[in-house]
Amino acid sequence: MPVTSPELPKLLIVEDDPTLRKQLQWALMEHPLVFAEDRPTALAAARKEEPPVVILDLGLPPDPGGVSVGLDTLRAILAHKPTTKVIVSSGNSDRANALEAIRSGAYDFYPKPVDQDVLKVIIGRAWNSFQLEEEIIQLRNRMGTDNSFFGVVSASPAMQKACSLAERVASSNVSVVITGETGTGKDMMARAIHAASARADGPFIAINCAAIPQSLLESELFGHEKGAFTGAHAQVVGKVEQAHKGTLFLDEIGDMPLMLQAKLLRFLQDRMVERIGGRKPIPVDVRVLAATNQDLAQMMKDGTFREDLYFRLNEVAIAIPPLRERPGDAVLIATHLLSKAQATIGKAVKGFTREALECIEAYPWPGNVRELENRIKRAVVMSEQGYISIADLDLECAAPQCPQDNLPTLKQVREDAERELLTRTLALTGNNIQEASRLLGVSRPTLYALMKTLNFGKSAN
């Protein structure tokens, strides 16, 4: 009886031809195998066994000469567990049917007659893709319960630290300066702080200090009275007043002119605004958040940002790390953005190819989350195969930049750590096994066994 490997996936083989079944059984004997001959037995096996990979012949009874039953079986299997990787069999004459199956959700197809090497490669790729998608789902589930902060998607320690700080300050009224490179999500973090605060039911008013001409920025912020200047045909309530009982978000605060910095400082001190052309101070209850991609401390030294305003705004600082310093976050954010893009664009996409996910994780993302979002939107529009590829993302990701296949296994990491610790301990004790075993907290037989496993020499005493 063939010995199966626990490292290989269980396969469900749906094939009504006994000769082909026998051939596949022989070719794939190392895998745990489950067989089905028709649609009912295939669906029963899929529900009971939940195999990660299915090999499906499209020509099933009662219509072995057609593909309708096979396609219905494919859709039913995927409806039960969408991450299942279904590989359909295809002869040269029914390649169009295989492509139709892929449009219906099949992972890939293999040609008839069976080429064992080709089929094993396809199965290996399908298994890798299944594992990666399952890992993403688990991470997203954890993120959705424990690691989320009002829509800020993250799992990396660096970003979790920023979210934890934001969550702690959200309940207070302290002013916060959010720093980070362009596109890291400073606006989203500000909105999350507002949503987590007692002011969540109040307005969230944002103004980009770099996007409005200096001549208009004061009026945008503080408003003006009718007739205050040429063209002021009506009274205008400024952003600060609009944010009453809510949150005012000053994006790109480093681009605010010095003259306006003085007026903003006066408001932060008095919590009163005076419209241009007005004579009556207006009290405003507002929480102020600011963001910048500039070095405000250096700007203070250069005389382009007021020191007193800096300390008024920067009661708490939250630094958002760039995406390249947030391992694992790029893939999580990509899957989140894919769902949003599909809803916005109105086009269904099944997911990413494994190569695309590896490239997303390895790419440095100089434009951060904003660049990633643009790439995902483009990919949804361009995708024609059901799964987004590297080409759809329009990324250049050479093999050396995609380290997924070169990642060490947990066993390798553990052995490397044990080898390093053992080397240091033996050097420290002068190769004295008794002293080394005491320092390591293991028995001498255990230490000898470890040395044998790691191929250490026998010079120790």
Image (spheres, rainbow, N blue to C red):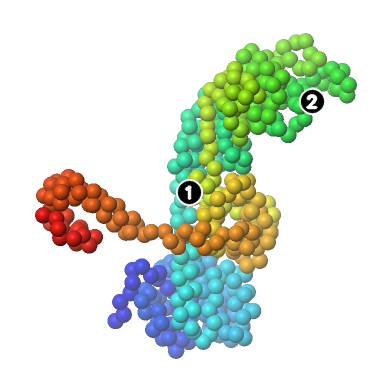
Quadrant into which the C terminus falls: bottom left
Q: What residue is pinned by disc 1?
A: 327
Compared to 113, does 34 lie above or below?
above
Q: What residue is pinned by disc 2?
A: 215
Quadrant into which the N terminus falls: bottom left
Numbered disc 1: secondary structure: loop
Q: Position of residue 91 (x, y in %)?
A: 57, 84
Front residue of 121 and 202: 121
Q: Position of residue 66 (x, y in %)?
A: 60, 83
Name the kind of residue labelled 2 in the image. Ser
Residue located at (55% from left, 24% from top): 314
User: Disc 1 vs disc 2: Cβ atoms closer than 8 Å?
Assistant: no
Q: Is residue 400 visible?
A: yes
Q: Residue furthest top?
A: 279
Q: Where is residue 142 in the image (x, y as percent from the top left)?
A: 45, 47
The span from disc 1 to disc 2 (Cα, nearest Å) is 43 Å
| N-terminal-most mark, 1 or 2 | 2
Residue 281 found in image quarter: top right
Compared to 383, does 212 lie above or below?
above
Q: Where is residue 269 in the image (x, y as percent from the top left)?
A: 62, 14
Front residue of 448 and 126: 448
Name the kind of residue labelled 1 in the image. Pro
Left or right: 346, with 435 as reference point? right
Residue located at (39% from left, 84% from top): 26
